[in-house]
Structures are given as C-alpha cells and as structure tokens.
Image (cartoon, helix red, strand yellow):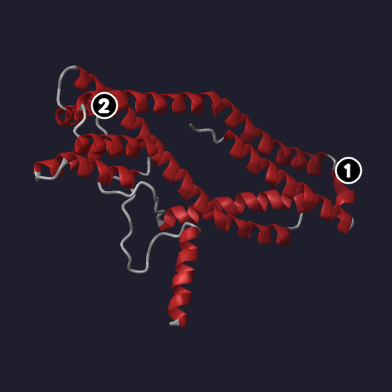
Amino acid sequence: MAIERAARGLERGLERLGWPAGGGRKQPASAGAGADYSRYELSRRQFWVAFAVGAALVFAAAYLFYLNAAVALLASLVGIKAPSLYREHARAKRQDRLRIHFKEMLFSLSSSLAAGRSVENALFASIGDLRLIYTGASTDLLLELERIRRRCANGETLESGLLDFAVRSGVEEIMQFSDVFTTCKRTGGDLVEIVRRTSQLIGERIEVNQEIQVLIAQKKFESRIMLGVPFAFLGFLHVAAPDYMAPLYAGAAGYGLLTAALLLFAACGWLMLKIMDIRL
C-alpha cells in the first residue's frame, strides 16, 4: 500500500509538471469532438522539448549572472517547470480559438433567428456558415456542432448536447449560453428572442475581449523586450568591460548582490506578466 501511495503521489507530481498521462490510464482527447478543453495533455516529445528550452534559458540567465557553469547547471533544474507553463499556454490558446469561433457561430445564429428560423435549425445552419469562413479546416467547434447534430438525430435533446459541450469547453461564454438555453427550454419563455439577445450580448463581450487583447499586444511585446534587455546588457558588460564586473565575483557580498538582483528581476518579470493578463 505504501508503494502504491508513493507511486500515485509521484504520478500526480509528474502530471503537475506537465508529464503526459500514462500508467495505463486513458489519456483525454487533446482536440476534436469529445475533447476536454479545460485540460491539455502534452506528448512526450512536447514535454522534453519544453523542458530542454526552459532549462537552456535558465542556464543561460544564471551563467550570465554567476559566470559559474556548476551553479548555472543546478539552476537549470528550474526548467522542469517549463512543460507545465507550456501546457497552460497551449490550453489557454486552444480555448481562445474556441471562443473566437463560438463568437462567429453566435453572429450566424442571431442572423438566422432574425430571419425567422427555429433555434435548432438556426444552430445547425451555422455549421454551413462556419465552413464558408474556415474553408478546408475542421475546427474544434465545427466538430462539436456536428457531434451535437448527430446526438439530436439519435433522439437526444439539443440542450443536453449543448450542456455537455459547455462543461467540456471550460469557456465561460459557452457555459453562459448553454445555461440560458437550458433555462428557457425548461421555463417555456420566448426562446427565440431570448437566445437572439443572449447571442448578441455574448458575441459583443467576446469582441470587446478581442479588442482589449489587440490594444495590449504592443505592451506585451515591449514587456518581453524589457525582460531580455538586462541580460543582453549584462552579457555586453562581460565582453566589453570584464574589469568593471570583476568586483562582483571577488567575494560573498558580490554573489549575494547578484542573487538579490536576479530574484528582484524574476519578481518584476512575474509582475509584468500578471499586469498584462487583462480580461473581462
């Protein structure tokens, strides 16, 4: 039992670091109909590439500060966190893509409802509109809508298919739309008008979020440059004026100052990234 608990603890720890699902368990789908969009499973290749890149960057940064290969190699172990960061980035990017495609679907749905179609017909008609927008591509949303249509053809209700997709998507706007649709179906309200207004409001919210991301895109780029400039300047000083930097490596006080500067710089970088993460 102790060995099993230790093995499970090790497995959970590896998963938090981004290690691919294994151990005989079924790995969640990473994309397409039936996928759990609130999770993203890295392949072993993605894990090792992310770890290698993260370790290399940390090694280079630590070596620039300490000019000691052993210390830099020890610090590079921090790169083990890189796969989990990459996994979260990939998950957020996939959900953002799903959110944008959902916005296009809502605009098509609103147009069809305004033309007098029923909710079911308008929703499935949006599949054709999306195929015109994303020609030659099978996007996640298209696959999910096709899956909902097949479930409805087999006798299931539309709201059950939407609810299942909303839960798996992990996208707030999709869950809000599903909740409104399900509530209207159960209470017998004016479904067409409520869904039309809800579609417009949610679509506008997603569009505002996109505009915010466009407005801060330049600031994000500038923040990345600001994060890289100190390392470039430090490398330049090591090459152009090594005597100027020599006192920092002459005793414990110098190394303490370098460590404090590195920690402050890391905290500043983390704070900059947090400030740039703006959403409604």
Q: Is residue 52 above or below residue 109?
A: below
Q: Quadrant of residue 98?
A: top left
Which of these two is toward me, 2 or 239? Answer: 2
Q: Earlier in the sequence, mark 2 or mark 1?
A: 2
**Residue lying at 71% horizontally and 39% vertically, measured from the top left:** 232
**Residue lying at 24% horizontally and 31% vertically, measured from the top left:** 136
* Tag count: 2
Q: Is residue 66 above or below residue 280?
A: below
Mark 2 vs mark 1, foreground winner is 2
**Residue sitting farthest toward the top:** 115
Badge 1 amino acid = Tyr
Task: Please say whether residue 138 is visible from this viewpoint.
Answer: no
Q: Quadrant of residue 183?
A: top left
Residue, disc 2: 194
Q: Is residue 191 above or below residue 16?
A: above
| Left or right position of 275 against 94 | right
Badge 2 amino acid = Ile
User: Residue 20's spot in the image, x, y percent?
Assistant: 41, 59
Residue 244 circle label:
1
